[in-house]
Image (cartoon, helix red, strand yellow):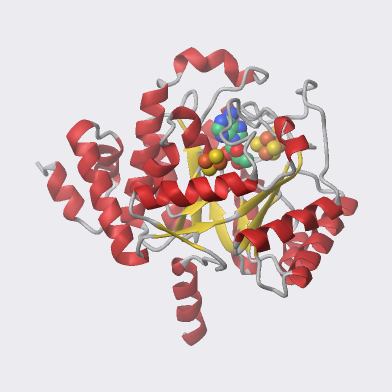
Amino acid sequence: MKTFDDILEQSRFDRDDLKRLLDSRGAEAEKLRQRALAVKLGTLDNHVHLRGLVELSNICRKDCLYCGLRRSNTKVVRYTVSDEEVMGCARLALELGYGSMAIQCGERSDRAFTERITRLVREIKRLSDNSIGITLSCGEQSEEVYREWFEAGAHRYLLRIESSDKSLYEKIHPQDDVHDFERRLACIDSLLKTGYQTGTGVMVGLPFQTLDHLVHDLLFFQEKDVAMVGLGPFLPHPDTPLWAYREQIPSDEERMRLTLNMIATLRLMMPEINMVAATATQTLDPQGREKAVEAGANVIMPNLTPQQYREEYLIYPDKACVGDKPEQCRGCLDLRMKSIGHEILYNAWGDSVAFTKRSARQGSA
Ligand code: 5AD
Ligand code: SF4
Ligand code: FES
Protein backbone atom coordinates (compact mmCIF):
# COMPACT_ATOMS: atom_id res chain seq x y z
CA MET A 1 0.00 0.00 0.00
CA LYS A 2 1.38 3.40 -1.05
CA THR A 3 1.94 5.99 1.65
CA PHE A 4 0.75 9.58 1.29
CA ASP A 5 4.39 10.65 0.84
CA ASP A 6 4.83 8.11 -1.98
CA ILE A 7 1.88 9.66 -3.81
CA LEU A 8 3.26 13.18 -3.40
CA GLU A 9 6.50 12.09 -5.08
CA GLN A 10 4.70 10.88 -8.22
CA SER A 11 4.33 12.99 -11.34
CA ARG A 12 1.16 11.25 -12.50
CA PHE A 13 -1.82 10.34 -10.37
CA ASP A 14 -4.58 7.79 -10.82
CA ARG A 15 -8.12 8.23 -9.49
CA ASP A 16 -7.31 6.64 -6.15
CA ASP A 17 -4.25 8.86 -5.67
CA LEU A 18 -6.30 11.95 -6.46
CA LYS A 19 -8.99 10.91 -4.05
CA ARG A 20 -6.45 10.49 -1.27
CA LEU A 21 -4.91 13.86 -1.99
CA LEU A 22 -8.32 15.58 -2.01
CA ASP A 23 -9.42 13.82 1.14
CA SER A 24 -6.30 14.75 3.10
CA ARG A 25 -6.55 16.78 6.29
CA GLY A 26 -4.31 17.93 9.13
CA ALA A 27 -0.61 17.18 8.68
CA GLU A 28 -1.19 15.40 5.35
CA ALA A 29 -3.11 18.32 3.86
CA GLU A 30 -0.30 20.58 5.08
CA LYS A 31 2.26 18.43 3.24
CA LEU A 32 0.16 18.48 0.06
CA ARG A 33 -0.02 22.27 0.10
CA GLN A 34 3.67 22.68 0.85
CA ARG A 35 4.52 20.41 -2.03
CA ALA A 36 2.19 22.35 -4.35
CA LEU A 37 3.75 25.64 -3.22
CA ALA A 38 7.24 24.28 -3.91
CA VAL A 39 6.18 23.12 -7.39
CA LYS A 40 4.62 26.51 -8.12
CA LEU A 41 7.65 28.47 -6.91
CA GLY A 42 9.92 26.24 -8.97
CA THR A 43 7.82 26.70 -12.12
CA LEU A 44 6.29 30.19 -11.94
CA ASP A 45 8.37 31.84 -9.22
CA ASN A 46 6.60 33.81 -6.47
CA HIS A 47 4.75 36.01 -8.98
CA VAL A 48 1.09 36.93 -8.66
CA HIS A 49 -0.84 38.41 -11.58
CA LEU A 50 -3.78 40.79 -11.27
CA ARG A 51 -6.90 41.05 -13.44
CA GLY A 52 -8.87 44.23 -12.73
CA LEU A 53 -12.47 43.01 -12.71
CA VAL A 54 -15.39 44.87 -14.25
CA GLU A 55 -18.78 43.37 -13.45
CA LEU A 56 -20.33 44.78 -16.59
CA SER A 57 -23.95 43.79 -16.09
CA ASN A 58 -26.06 41.53 -13.91
CA ILE A 59 -28.68 40.97 -16.60
CA CYS A 60 -28.75 37.23 -17.25
CA ARG A 61 -30.94 34.98 -19.37
CA LYS A 62 -30.06 31.95 -17.26
CA ASP A 63 -31.52 30.60 -14.08
CA CYS A 64 -28.71 28.58 -12.47
CA LEU A 65 -30.03 27.15 -9.21
CA TYR A 66 -27.06 28.43 -7.15
CA CYS A 67 -26.57 31.98 -8.41
CA GLY A 68 -27.91 35.20 -6.91
CA LEU A 69 -28.12 36.78 -10.37
CA ARG A 70 -30.45 34.10 -11.80
CA ARG A 71 -33.20 35.62 -13.86
CA SER A 72 -35.94 34.48 -11.45
CA ASN A 73 -34.42 36.49 -8.61
CA THR A 74 -36.63 39.56 -8.74
CA LYS A 75 -34.90 41.15 -5.72
CA VAL A 76 -31.93 42.09 -7.88
CA VAL A 77 -32.02 45.54 -9.48
CA ARG A 78 -30.61 44.94 -12.95
CA TYR A 79 -27.89 47.30 -14.20
CA THR A 80 -25.42 47.76 -17.00
CA VAL A 81 -22.22 49.77 -16.58
CA SER A 82 -22.05 52.49 -19.27
CA ASP A 83 -19.36 52.60 -21.96
CA GLU A 84 -17.85 55.74 -20.39
CA GLU A 85 -17.67 54.03 -17.01
CA VAL A 86 -15.98 50.99 -18.54
CA MET A 87 -13.37 53.27 -20.09
CA GLY A 88 -12.98 54.90 -16.67
CA CYS A 89 -12.20 51.42 -15.28
CA ALA A 90 -9.63 50.91 -18.04
CA ARG A 91 -7.93 54.20 -17.17
CA LEU A 92 -7.94 53.19 -13.52
CA ALA A 93 -6.38 49.84 -14.43
CA LEU A 94 -3.61 51.74 -16.25
CA GLU A 95 -3.05 54.08 -13.32
CA LEU A 96 -2.94 51.24 -10.81
CA GLY A 97 -0.54 49.26 -13.00
CA TYR A 98 -2.94 46.36 -13.53
CA GLY A 99 -1.69 44.90 -16.79
CA SER A 100 -4.90 43.07 -17.43
CA MET A 101 -8.65 43.46 -17.14
CA ALA A 102 -11.42 40.91 -16.85
CA ILE A 103 -14.93 41.69 -18.05
CA GLN A 104 -17.55 39.53 -16.43
CA CYS A 105 -21.32 39.62 -16.83
CA GLY A 106 -24.54 37.68 -16.81
CA GLU A 107 -25.25 35.80 -20.00
CA ARG A 108 -26.89 37.49 -23.00
CA SER A 109 -26.63 36.50 -26.61
CA ASP A 110 -28.50 39.25 -28.46
CA ARG A 111 -26.61 41.09 -31.17
CA ALA A 112 -26.76 44.47 -29.37
CA PHE A 113 -24.89 42.87 -26.47
CA THR A 114 -22.32 40.91 -28.46
CA GLU A 115 -21.52 43.96 -30.61
CA ARG A 116 -21.13 46.09 -27.52
CA ILE A 117 -18.52 43.69 -26.12
CA THR A 118 -16.64 43.80 -29.42
CA ARG A 119 -16.65 47.59 -29.30
CA LEU A 120 -15.56 47.75 -25.66
CA VAL A 121 -12.69 45.33 -26.25
CA ARG A 122 -11.48 47.40 -29.21
CA GLU A 123 -11.76 50.64 -27.26
CA ILE A 124 -9.86 49.34 -24.26
CA LYS A 125 -7.14 48.09 -26.59
CA ARG A 126 -6.99 51.47 -28.32
CA LEU A 127 -7.06 53.49 -25.09
CA SER A 128 -4.22 51.48 -23.58
CA ASP A 129 -2.20 51.25 -26.77
CA ASN A 130 -2.62 47.48 -26.54
CA SER A 131 -0.95 47.41 -23.14
CA ILE A 132 -3.94 45.98 -21.25
CA GLY A 133 -4.66 42.28 -21.65
CA ILE A 134 -8.35 41.34 -21.73
CA THR A 135 -10.09 38.31 -20.27
CA LEU A 136 -13.76 37.85 -21.06
CA SER A 137 -16.19 35.92 -18.94
CA CYS A 138 -19.50 36.45 -20.72
CA GLY A 139 -20.93 32.98 -20.88
CA GLU A 140 -21.95 30.70 -23.73
CA GLN A 141 -21.81 32.19 -27.20
CA SER A 142 -21.63 30.96 -30.78
CA GLU A 143 -18.24 30.19 -32.26
CA GLU A 144 -18.63 33.25 -34.54
CA VAL A 145 -19.10 35.54 -31.56
CA TYR A 146 -16.13 34.01 -29.75
CA ARG A 147 -14.07 34.61 -32.90
CA GLU A 148 -15.31 38.19 -33.26
CA TRP A 149 -14.32 39.00 -29.68
CA PHE A 150 -10.97 37.29 -30.12
CA GLU A 151 -10.25 39.28 -33.26
CA ALA A 152 -11.24 42.47 -31.43
CA GLY A 153 -8.40 41.75 -29.00
CA ALA A 154 -9.67 39.59 -26.13
CA HIS A 155 -7.13 36.83 -25.62
CA ARG A 156 -8.35 34.98 -22.55
CA TYR A 157 -11.78 33.54 -21.80
CA LEU A 158 -13.14 32.04 -18.63
CA LEU A 159 -16.12 29.67 -18.79
CA ARG A 160 -16.53 27.45 -15.76
CA ILE A 161 -18.00 24.05 -16.46
CA GLU A 162 -19.42 24.31 -12.88
CA SER A 163 -19.31 20.51 -12.67
CA SER A 164 -17.76 18.21 -15.27
CA ASP A 165 -20.20 15.48 -14.28
CA LYS A 166 -23.29 15.63 -16.47
CA SER A 167 -25.69 14.34 -13.84
CA LEU A 168 -24.41 16.73 -11.15
CA TYR A 169 -24.50 19.59 -13.67
CA GLU A 170 -28.12 18.76 -14.35
CA LYS A 171 -28.99 18.74 -10.64
CA ILE A 172 -27.76 22.31 -10.18
CA HIS A 173 -29.40 23.74 -13.30
CA PRO A 174 -32.99 23.84 -14.53
CA GLN A 175 -33.91 21.08 -16.96
CA ASP A 176 -34.45 23.03 -20.14
CA ASP A 177 -32.55 23.81 -23.32
CA VAL A 178 -31.12 27.10 -21.99
CA HIS A 179 -29.05 25.04 -19.54
CA ASP A 180 -27.46 22.31 -21.58
CA PHE A 181 -24.36 20.48 -20.39
CA GLU A 182 -23.32 19.34 -23.86
CA ARG A 183 -23.54 22.87 -25.22
CA ARG A 184 -21.37 24.17 -22.38
CA LEU A 185 -18.76 21.52 -23.20
CA ALA A 186 -18.95 22.48 -26.88
CA CYS A 187 -18.38 26.14 -25.93
CA ILE A 188 -15.17 25.23 -24.10
CA ASP A 189 -14.03 23.35 -27.18
CA SER A 190 -14.84 26.37 -29.40
CA LEU A 191 -12.85 28.66 -27.11
CA LEU A 192 -9.84 26.35 -27.25
CA LYS A 193 -10.16 26.09 -31.02
CA THR A 194 -10.50 29.87 -31.48
CA GLY A 195 -7.15 30.35 -29.81
CA TYR A 196 -8.06 31.85 -26.48
CA GLN A 197 -6.12 31.09 -23.36
CA THR A 198 -9.10 29.17 -22.10
CA GLY A 199 -10.04 28.82 -18.48
CA THR A 200 -12.66 26.76 -16.79
CA GLY A 201 -13.48 25.70 -13.25
CA VAL A 202 -15.99 24.38 -10.78
CA MET A 203 -17.62 25.13 -7.46
CA VAL A 204 -16.45 23.06 -4.53
CA GLY A 205 -18.83 21.79 -1.84
CA LEU A 206 -22.03 21.78 -3.89
CA PRO A 207 -25.01 19.79 -2.69
CA PHE A 208 -24.86 16.21 -4.08
CA GLN A 209 -21.14 16.61 -4.88
CA THR A 210 -18.81 13.73 -3.92
CA LEU A 211 -15.03 13.33 -3.93
CA ASP A 212 -15.41 11.28 -7.09
CA HIS A 213 -17.03 14.26 -8.80
CA LEU A 214 -14.08 16.46 -7.81
CA VAL A 215 -11.60 13.86 -9.06
CA HIS A 216 -13.54 13.84 -12.34
CA ASP A 217 -13.22 17.65 -12.48
CA LEU A 218 -9.44 17.51 -12.03
CA LEU A 219 -9.09 14.92 -14.78
CA PHE A 220 -11.35 17.02 -17.00
CA PHE A 221 -9.09 20.09 -16.63
CA GLN A 222 -6.12 17.96 -17.54
CA GLU A 223 -7.79 16.24 -20.46
CA LYS A 224 -8.90 19.58 -21.96
CA ASP A 225 -5.40 20.90 -21.34
CA VAL A 226 -6.82 24.28 -20.30
CA ALA A 227 -4.55 27.26 -19.69
CA MET A 228 -6.34 28.58 -16.63
CA VAL A 229 -8.57 27.35 -13.84
CA GLY A 230 -10.77 29.30 -11.46
CA LEU A 231 -12.36 27.30 -8.72
CA GLY A 232 -13.90 28.33 -5.45
CA PRO A 233 -16.17 27.20 -2.67
CA PHE A 234 -19.92 27.06 -3.17
CA LEU A 235 -21.63 29.70 -1.00
CA PRO A 236 -25.37 29.23 -0.55
CA HIS A 237 -27.40 32.31 -1.56
CA PRO A 238 -30.72 32.84 0.28
CA ASP A 239 -32.62 33.85 -2.86
CA THR A 240 -31.80 30.70 -4.82
CA PRO A 241 -33.24 27.16 -4.86
CA LEU A 242 -30.01 25.55 -3.59
CA TRP A 243 -30.33 27.52 -0.34
CA ALA A 244 -32.73 24.76 0.78
CA TYR A 245 -29.78 22.31 0.76
CA ARG A 246 -27.44 24.44 2.87
CA GLU A 247 -27.62 22.01 5.80
CA GLN A 248 -26.58 19.13 3.56
CA ILE A 249 -23.31 20.56 2.28
CA PRO A 250 -19.93 20.30 4.04
CA SER A 251 -19.25 22.95 6.72
CA ASP A 252 -17.47 26.22 5.88
CA GLU A 253 -14.16 24.77 7.15
CA GLU A 254 -14.64 21.61 5.11
CA ARG A 255 -15.45 23.52 1.92
CA MET A 256 -12.36 25.65 2.48
CA ARG A 257 -10.22 22.56 3.07
CA LEU A 258 -11.55 20.89 -0.08
CA THR A 259 -11.04 24.05 -2.15
CA LEU A 260 -7.41 24.35 -1.02
CA ASN A 261 -6.84 20.64 -1.63
CA MET A 262 -8.27 21.01 -5.14
CA ILE A 263 -5.94 23.94 -5.87
CA ALA A 264 -2.90 22.15 -4.47
CA THR A 265 -3.61 18.87 -6.25
CA LEU A 266 -4.22 20.64 -9.54
CA ARG A 267 -0.96 22.56 -9.18
CA LEU A 268 0.83 19.21 -8.92
CA MET A 269 -1.00 17.94 -12.01
CA MET A 270 -0.65 21.11 -14.11
CA PRO A 271 2.34 23.09 -12.80
CA GLU A 272 2.25 25.79 -15.49
CA ILE A 273 -1.39 26.86 -15.61
CA ASN A 274 -2.76 30.11 -14.24
CA MET A 275 -4.97 29.52 -11.25
CA VAL A 276 -7.19 32.10 -9.58
CA ALA A 277 -7.33 32.67 -5.84
CA ALA A 278 -11.09 33.29 -5.91
CA THR A 279 -12.62 36.12 -3.91
CA ALA A 280 -15.14 33.53 -2.68
CA THR A 281 -12.38 31.89 -0.59
CA GLN A 282 -12.16 35.11 1.42
CA THR A 283 -15.85 34.86 2.34
CA LEU A 284 -15.10 31.62 4.18
CA ASP A 285 -11.78 32.69 5.69
CA PRO A 286 -10.34 36.21 6.17
CA GLN A 287 -7.02 34.84 4.88
CA GLY A 288 -8.71 32.87 2.10
CA ARG A 289 -6.89 34.33 -0.86
CA GLU A 290 -3.50 34.14 0.84
CA LYS A 291 -4.15 30.50 1.66
CA ALA A 292 -5.18 29.83 -1.93
CA VAL A 293 -1.96 31.44 -3.20
CA GLU A 294 0.06 29.43 -0.69
CA ALA A 295 -1.66 26.28 -1.97
CA GLY A 296 -0.75 27.00 -5.60
CA ALA A 297 -2.90 29.82 -7.04
CA ASN A 298 -1.14 32.69 -8.86
CA VAL A 299 -3.87 35.10 -10.04
CA ILE A 300 -6.07 37.56 -8.13
CA MET A 301 -8.98 39.56 -9.53
CA PRO A 302 -9.36 42.86 -7.67
CA ASN A 303 -12.67 44.61 -8.30
CA LEU A 304 -12.80 47.76 -10.45
CA THR A 305 -16.60 47.90 -10.83
CA PRO A 306 -17.99 51.38 -10.06
CA GLN A 307 -19.17 51.43 -6.45
CA GLN A 308 -22.87 52.09 -7.11
CA TYR A 309 -23.35 48.75 -8.89
CA ARG A 310 -21.50 46.39 -6.61
CA GLU A 311 -24.33 45.52 -4.21
CA GLU A 312 -26.27 44.28 -7.22
CA TYR A 313 -23.60 41.82 -8.33
CA LEU A 314 -23.91 39.45 -5.41
CA ILE A 315 -23.59 36.07 -7.10
CA TYR A 316 -23.15 34.77 -3.54
CA PRO A 317 -23.62 36.60 -0.20
CA ASP A 318 -20.90 38.35 1.88
CA LYS A 319 -18.54 39.01 -1.00
CA ALA A 320 -15.21 40.47 0.13
CA CYS A 321 -14.11 44.02 -0.78
CA VAL A 322 -17.57 45.15 -1.98
CA GLY A 323 -17.15 48.45 -0.11
CA ASP A 324 -13.44 48.94 -0.76
CA LYS A 325 -12.00 51.41 -3.23
CA PRO A 326 -9.68 50.05 -5.96
CA GLU A 327 -6.74 52.04 -4.51
CA GLN A 328 -7.35 50.42 -1.11
CA CYS A 329 -7.46 46.92 -2.55
CA ARG A 330 -4.27 47.56 -4.50
CA GLY A 331 -2.33 48.51 -1.35
CA CYS A 332 -4.01 45.81 0.68
CA LEU A 333 -3.25 43.06 -1.83
CA ASP A 334 0.33 44.20 -2.20
CA LEU A 335 0.85 43.91 1.56
CA ARG A 336 -1.04 40.64 1.81
CA MET A 337 1.08 39.05 -0.92
CA LYS A 338 4.32 40.37 0.58
CA SER A 339 3.29 38.93 3.94
CA ILE A 340 3.38 35.46 2.38
CA GLY A 341 6.57 36.02 0.39
CA HIS A 342 4.86 36.66 -2.95
CA GLU A 343 5.28 39.51 -5.39
CA ILE A 344 2.61 41.13 -7.54
CA LEU A 345 3.78 41.79 -11.10
CA TYR A 346 2.42 45.13 -12.27
CA ASN A 347 2.03 46.29 -15.87
CA ALA A 348 2.22 42.75 -17.27
CA TRP A 349 -0.34 40.54 -19.02
CA GLY A 350 0.69 37.56 -16.96
CA ASP A 351 -0.04 35.00 -19.65
CA SER A 352 -0.40 31.34 -18.84
CA VAL A 353 2.99 29.65 -19.18
CA ALA A 354 1.15 26.44 -20.02
CA PHE A 355 -0.51 28.18 -22.97
CA THR A 356 2.62 29.92 -24.23
CA LYS A 357 4.57 26.66 -24.24
CA ARG A 358 1.78 24.74 -25.93
CA SER A 359 1.47 27.40 -28.66
CA ALA A 360 5.23 27.28 -29.23
CA ARG A 361 5.09 23.48 -29.56
CA GLN A 362 2.19 23.68 -31.99
CA GLY A 363 3.92 26.44 -33.95
CA SER A 364 7.09 24.41 -34.42
CA ALA A 365 5.29 21.12 -35.16
N1 5AD B 1 -21.31 30.27 -4.71
C1 5AD B 1 -20.08 30.26 -5.27
N2 5AD B 1 -19.84 30.51 -6.55
C2 5AD B 1 -20.89 30.81 -7.33
N3 5AD B 1 -20.98 31.10 -8.63
C3 5AD B 1 -22.27 31.32 -8.94
N4 5AD B 1 -23.03 31.18 -7.84
C4 5AD B 1 -22.21 30.85 -6.82
C5 5AD B 1 -22.40 30.57 -5.45
N5 5AD B 1 -23.62 30.60 -4.89
C6 5AD B 1 -19.83 31.09 -9.54
C7 5AD B 1 -20.05 30.18 -10.73
C8 5AD B 1 -19.99 31.11 -11.91
C9 5AD B 1 -19.18 32.26 -11.38
C10 5AD B 1 -19.40 33.54 -12.09
O1 5AD B 1 -19.60 32.38 -10.04
O2 5AD B 1 -19.03 29.20 -10.79
O3 5AD B 1 -19.33 30.54 -13.03
FE1 SF4 C 1 -26.27 33.85 -14.98
FE2 SF4 C 1 -23.72 33.07 -14.58
FE3 SF4 C 1 -25.39 33.40 -12.51
FE4 SF4 C 1 -25.77 31.33 -14.16
S1 SF4 C 1 -23.94 31.67 -12.84
S2 SF4 C 1 -27.39 32.73 -13.39
S3 SF4 C 1 -25.18 32.24 -16.13
S4 SF4 C 1 -24.67 35.02 -13.89
FE1 FES D 1 -9.81 44.60 -1.12
FE2 FES D 1 -8.05 43.98 0.91
S1 FES D 1 -8.09 43.31 -1.15
S2 FES D 1 -9.60 45.54 0.85
- The residue under the point 75% across, 56% down is 142
Question: Whole-percent x and y of residue 105?
Answer: 72, 44
Q: Would you say residue 215 is visible in this rendering? A: no
Q: Residue farthest to the bottom?
A: 364
Image-based side of 168 in relation to 38, left or right: right
Question: Whole-percent x and y of residue 4?
Answer: 15, 42
Image-based side of 164 in relation to 40, left or right: right
- The residue under the point 60% across, 64% down is 99
Position of 269 relative to 29 (above/below): below
Q: Where is ligand 1, by quadrant? A: top right
Position of 356 relative to 40 (above/below): below
Question: Whole-percent x and y of residue 181?
Answer: 62, 41
Q: Quadrant of residue 55?
A: top right
Residue nearest the observer in this picture, 172 or 345: 345
Position of 319 relative to 106 (above/below): above
Q: Quadrant of residue 31?
A: top left
Q: Would you say residue 311 is visible in this rendering? A: yes
Q: Residue farthest to the right?
A: 112
Quadrant that contains the N terminus:
top left
- The residue under the point 47% across, 86% down is 364
- The residue under the point 45% across, 79% down is 361
Residue nearest the observer in this picture, 199 or 42: 42
Position of 332 relative to 341 (above/below): above
Question: Whole-percent x and y of residue 339?
Answer: 36, 48
Image-based side of 224 in relation to 210, left or right: right
